[in-house]
Amino acid sequence: MLGGRGAGKTRAGAEWVKLLALGVLEPVLSRCARIAIVAPTFDEARMVMIEGESGLLAVHNERERPRYEPSKRTITWHNGSVAQIFSAEEPDGLRGPQFDAAWCDEMAKWKKADTVWMNLQMALRLGEAPQAVITTTPRPTKVIRSLINDAATVVTRSKTLDNRGNLAATFLSEVLAKYGGTNLGRQELDGEVIADDPDALWTREMIERARVRKLPPMARVVVAVDPPATSGARANACGIVCAGLGEDGRAYVLDDASCRRLTPLQWAARVAKLFHQRGADRIVAEVNQGGDMVRDVLAQVDGALPVKAVHASKGKKARAEPVAALYEQGRVSHVGAFAELEDEMCSVIGDGTSPDRLDALVWALTELLLRKQQGPRVRAV
């Protein structure tokens, strides 16, 4: 079930599980006694799929409502049907159990999607016709593309506007004004799977080919920040990306901590926290938009932060091209998945959007691989 944001995917998935657990579809489809609930994280399973206003508990009436035991990560119906809850962050949790149905939510966000889906397929071995429903806003990930092309998959699509009767008018007007007609809008609002743009500098295959889960020892780590020119609800994102240079000479993208709607002090605190968590040796900050403000706001948060100010003398595409070449040469890996960052990388630069995450990535990798290294001697702000 591919759908836009707010299109009703969660409600549909919850209703599907309810029908199977209660045996409402018999004799067309037998009651499912063992069901897997798989979310990006355990927190999202609880807050969205189970306790959310469109979640499992909400779609049952008082008499039918199952018992939810968070400590056991189980949901039990009066007739004995049981659902077990799993996080896509822990693929091995699906080794051992067996099911006759599964509900997978937001698969496009799963960081270990290949392994999780493989383990789940091995576990779907009970009943007459074991099956899964996947409710997700799509991205052209390897697993999503494979499922769509599988003859055994039934694909349905829904748009955000299809559910307009249950959504705030202000939300609709805001997102349509900002994203209507854009590739991001087609993906996030219309539920379309957007393939790579042939004019983009990166392809998803290029990124996927070099993706890793384990790190070698790090020789350097930097945090790059591309601050927004303004603040408030309509401001661009603040790009914050952490990357490291391995002792093997390759670069590794460690974190995308980019954010929206934060005050300068708030995003500066986010930068400082990531700097210390990762044991970084430098903050690379673009100062075209803010100048001394960028240095000052970082100093207010932590006066000992070593900040290197960089100025964008070239256009975004010209700065990004040498970094894209590093990916083509196999010199950069992403540690895990960064969906929003990778979406920006695989879009055309200069199409009217502001690729703030990508800007931060470019500054970080330029510092690690494309500048002559001069040691850690950096003036602290």
Image (spheres, rainbow, N blue to C red):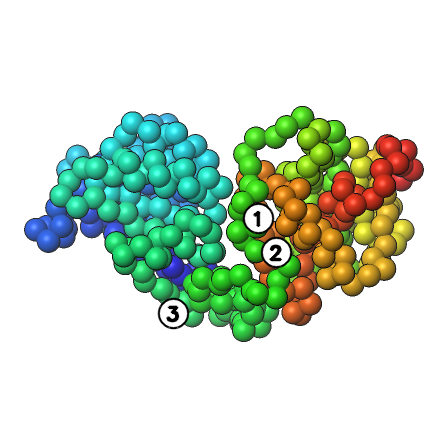
Q: Looking at the rendered structure, which numbered label has been put on residue 162?
A: 3
Cβ–Cβ under 8 Å for marks 1 and 2: yes
Which callout, 3 or 2, points to the residue nearer the camera?
Answer: 2
In the displayed structure, would residue 357 be above or below residue 318? above
For the C terminus, the image quarter is top right
Residue bearing the label numbered 2: 202
The residue depicted at 72 percent of the width and 56 percent of the height is: 320
The residues bearing labels 1 and 2 have C-alpha atoms spaced at a distance of 8 Å
Give coordinates of residue 310: x percent, y percent: 85, 50
Helix, strand or loop status at disc 3? helix
Type of amino acid at the residue the image marks with label 3: Asp
Type of amino acid at the residue the image marks with label 1: Ile
Using residue 216 as the reference point, say whether residue 7 is left or right of it. left
Binning the other alpha carbons within 10 Å of mark 2 as few (below 14), some (14 to 19) or many (20 upward) gives many
Helix, strand or loop status at disc 2? loop
- The answer to whether one can see residue 357 in this image is yes
Binning the other alpha carbons within 10 Å of mark 3 as few (below 14), some (14 to 19) or many (20 upward) gives some
Residue bearing the label numbered 1: 207
